Amino acid sequence: MTKLADINRSIEQMPTSEIAPIVQSALGDASASPVTGWTASPMRAESIGQGTLGFAQVSGMATTSFGKKLVGWSSVVKAVNPADASLRGEDSFDTSEREIGFYRSGF
C-alpha cells in the first residue's frame, strides 16, 4: 500500500509544468509561475471515502504578473487510491474513481 510520505515526496518532485496549473488556480493568475522548492506536509483529516489515502497541504512561492512580485501559495491535496473501484465497481457511491471523475468534469 502506498504511504502518504511517498505521496508527499512525489508531490515535492513534480515538474514545474505539472504543479503550475494548481498554483495558477490557487492564485487566480493564469501567468503565475511556481518557484521550485514547494513542500507537502501531511494533514490530519478524516474522510468517509474508503479509497482515501490521506491529505497533504502543499505550499510554496510563485512569481505573479501582478507587479511581478513573489507571493506565497497553498493548496490541499487529497490522495486517493484509484484501484479501489475495481473492488466494488465504478458505480459504487464511494469509489475514488467516481470522485476523480467528478473533479475532472469541471462541475
Image (cartoon, grey):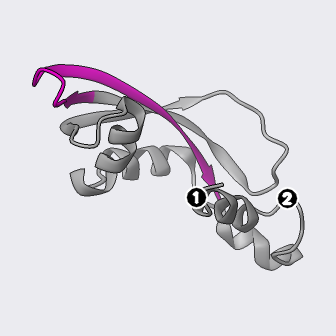
- Observer-nearest of 43 and 78: 78
The kind of residue on which mark 2 rests is Asp
Residue plotted at (21% across, 30% down):
62
Residue receiving disc 1: 2
Q: How many marks?
A: 2
Whether 62 is among the magenta residues is yes
Residue 86 in which image quadrant? bottom right
Please state, as top left, top right, bottom left or bottom right, where the C terminus lies in the image: bottom right
x, y percent for residue 87: 83, 76
Q: Secondary structure at mark 1?
A: loop
Which residues lie in the magenta part? 61-80
| Residues at discs 1 and 2 in contact (Cβ within 8 Å) | no
Residue plotted at (16% across, 31% down):
65
Task: Tell me: 70 left or right of 46.
Answer: left
Whether 90 is among the magenta residues is no
Residue plotted at (30% across, 28% down):
60
x, y percent for residue 64: 19, 30
